[in-house]
Amino acid sequence: MILILRLIRESYLFAFQAIIVNKVRTILSLLGITIGIFCVISVFTVFDSMENAIRKSIASLGSNVLYVQKWPWAMGGDYPWWKYWQRPEPSLADMQEIEKRSNLSESVAYMVQVNKTVKYLNNYMENIGVNGVSQDFDKVWKFELGEGRYFSTTESASGKNIALIGADIAADLFREGDPVGKKIKIFGRNIEVVGVITKEGEDFFGNSNDKAVYLPVNFFKTLVDLRDMGATIVVKAKPMVSNDELRDELTGLMRSIRKQKPSAEDNFAINETDIISKGFDSLFSVIAMVGWIIGGFSLLVGGFGIANIMFVSVKERTNIIGIQKALGAKNYFILLQFLFEAIFLSLIGGVFGLLIILLLTVVVSYTTEFHLLLTQGNIILGIGVSAIIGLISGILPAYSASKLDPVEAMRTGM
């Protein structure tokens, strides 16, 4: 242990001396390691932050929720849209039958959306997502009410002209006033606001309840034709029921409801958030590979730079190596001494690369809405890669130093 500590101390001192004595040469040589670590770890930092944001956005949709729709979700590859475009849209009748027959679902809701202008007195907001939803929508979709209340069962069934509005709509249309009890105008109809959804902010996909309006679907269908509106039936599984079990039940129910023959292909899609997750996993794996390739070239150049420093260091310290051997230093002592020095030099370059990334994460997080985070795993990865590059780059110079003849070394260095 004492020998190892002595080796580490001497290696550190020699590495530090190399930087002090030959500043420009050392900095230029370490630049490759710095750039390489910066390229690799910055790519992983960006993608880890993106993945975290995406995971949160996907989780907000519900991991135990399935979506019965006309179009299947897909990530990349060919999309055979011609197979799906003539499928019927999910209907209110479909939702009611699922609600009646399903044994594995906890809640079932229907939702459909159209973009419209929302007005209050002289204030208005354009291109607002106006949604028609069934009574149990609040049980399958996550949101909280900051003011007011949700629709009652009677109001949903009778199709009363009431609405829930997002926080941004409340702030823009009503300014300082309380929106609950006031009437907004959509489709030229007066609609009473009964609740305001707590401000959420946008998720990674740009979705938010802050600029959304929710109406009872039985009122909504008096304003628009639901048949070609791109509706969705949202089904939440009971506790301890897997998505696969619920999917199998829904498939059987939908085929029965639509009276499909056994040989006929499904004329509906059952989607889940896992499809999005798997699609992004594939995307991230490809981009991570690109990051390694880009950073790999810089790391290769940096490795050659470290090797160059070490060969020069061996030449400059030939006399010292001869004296150490004459005093009884073993070959492995000389070998380890130069290996440790190469690793220290490489780690210095890697640490500079990590510091640059840390600085950029702070700048980006404070100047934009995108939160970048340099994780502990990426720091360990950066340090580990730096150490490995130093080890590989230092093997040949260290081996050549360990094999020097002490007499010849002292004579050469004189």
Image (spheres, helix red, strand yellow):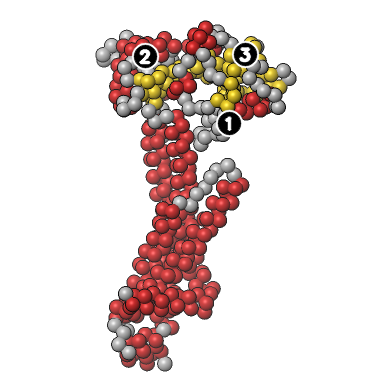
Residue 199, placed above or below residue 333: above
Check disc 2 and report its element: helix, strand or loop. Answer: helix
Residue 47, placed above or below residue 238: below
Q: CA distance from mark 2 to mark 1?
A: 32 Å
- On the image, the x and y values in percent for residue 81 come to 41, 23
Residue matched to label 2: 98
* Dot 2 amino acid type: Ile
Residue 199 disc label: 1
226 vs 78, left or right, is: right
The residue most toward the left is 262
Counting other residues with Cα less than 10 Å from the Cα at mark 2, is it few (<14), some (14-19), or many (20 or more)?
A: many
Residue matched to label 3: 191
* Dot 1 amino acid type: Lys
Q: CA distance from mark 1 to mark 3?
A: 21 Å
Disc on the earlier residue, 1 or 3: 3
- On the image, the x and y values in percent for residue 75 come to 41, 33
Residue 265 visible in the shown view: no
Q: Can you tell which quarter of the image residue 284 is in?
A: top left
Counting other residues with Cα less than 10 Å from the Cα at mark 1, is it few (<14), some (14-19), or many (20 or more)?
A: some
213 vs 377, left or right, is: right
* Dot 3 amino acid type: Ile
The residue most toward the right is 122
Which residue occupies 31% across, 11% down?
Answer: 256
- On the image, the x and y values in percent for residue 150 come to 53, 19
Disc on the earlier residue, 3 or 2: 2
Check disc 3 and report its element: helix, strand or loop. Answer: strand
Residue 74, placed above or below residue 345: above
Q: Quadrant of the N terminus?
A: bottom left
Disc on the earlier residue, 2 or 1: 2
